[in-house]
Image: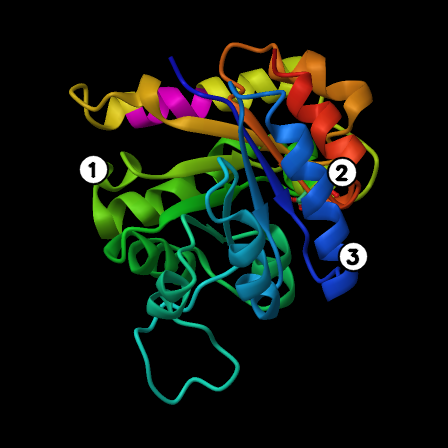
Amino acid sequence: MRCKLIAGNWKMNGSVECIRGLLEEIRKGAVTIPSVELAVFPPFVYLGLVEQQLSGTAISWGTQNISEYASGPYTGEVAGQMLRDFNCQYAIVGHSERRALYGESDQIVARKFAAALELGIKPILCVGETLEEREEGVTERVIERQIRAVLDLGGIGSFSDAVIAYEPVWAIGTGKTATSEQAQEVHSFIRSKLAVHDMMFPADQVRILYGGSMKPANARELLAMPDVDGGLIGGASLEAKEFLAIAKACG
Ligand code: PGA
């Protein structure tokens, strides 16, 4: 049985004051939904605050990015060991905004994925096609390529401690969500690829999240699909009520 994960990607939003308020409400609400794992992903500079507010609760936290390097002359980057210092359980890698705006290739993303795993941080690998790719009918090919880069570098075993997030680029921040059927189709494709790669690998234990304009109004339908194991939530994770309503829709 895969425990559902509702992850809030705050992107470049927040302030000390608003994070305090947001986490207080999330903490209160989380106790009423113990069967769902909640996680938040603040900008790096707020990790200390988030750790302070969430230590001892069941809520997890992590980062939106991680350096592929361990240390050294990489101005502006943050290494995995630094994330360990703040007890991060997760790191998002390969978000489409990182791929599109900061030139992260499949290979860079695979190295970031490996860097996280090496330190015992669970990577959340984001994959997804653009609108153009969907219209060209190459969605599966794109996702297979994004996953293959990680398989080539770390092997199938690296997915035992990882999460995958299917985020169609055309649905991120646009208000356009994939239908539950479209999401299920891609999620089951991803799972089948992991299974086919190695028949012995327990692909049915890997959590695959959906991301892209998930809101309380569409969450229940998406989360009811057999291969949708949670959500990676952007906009709606900045409002405690919406974030918690999505988590409640898991049940
Ligand atoms: P959104 O973002 O929920 O605002 O579409 C999702 C994401 O980018 O992870």
Dot 2: what SS? helix
The answer to which of 135 and 84 lies nearer the viewer is: 84
Mark 2 or mark 3, earlier in chain: 3
Choose mark 1 or mark 3, whichever is in front: 3
In the rendered image, which quarter contains the C terminus?
Answer: top right
Q: Left or right: where does residue 86 sit relative to residue 200?
A: right
**Residue at 32% in and 80% down:** 71
Q: Which mark is residue 18?
A: 3
Amino acid on which the number 1 mark rests in the picture: Gly
- Marks 2/3: CA–CA distance: 11 Å
Q: How busy is the neighbourhood of tag 1: few (under 14 within 10 Å), some, or many (20 plus)?
A: few
Q: Quadrant of ligand 1?
A: top right
Whole-percent x and y of residue 190?
43, 26
Amino acid on which the number 2 mark rests in the picture: Ala
Choose mark 2 or mark 1, whichever is in front: 2
Amino acid on which the number 3 mark rests in the picture: Cys
Dot 1: what SS? helix
Q: Which residue is mark 2?
A: 240
**Residue at 33% in and 21% down:** 205
In the displayed structure, 29 sits above or below 143; it is above
From this viewpoint, is residue 239 visible? yes
**Quarter of the view holding residue 167:** top right
In the displayed structure, 173 sits above or below 82; it is above
Whole-percent x and y of residue 16?
72, 65
In the displayed structure, 43 sits above or below 150; it is below
What's the magenta region?
Answer: 189-194
Mark 1 or mark 3, earlier in chain: 3
- Marks 2/1: CA–CA distance: 35 Å
Dot 3: what SS? helix
Q: Which residue is mark 1?
A: 157
- The magenta stretch spans residue 192: yes
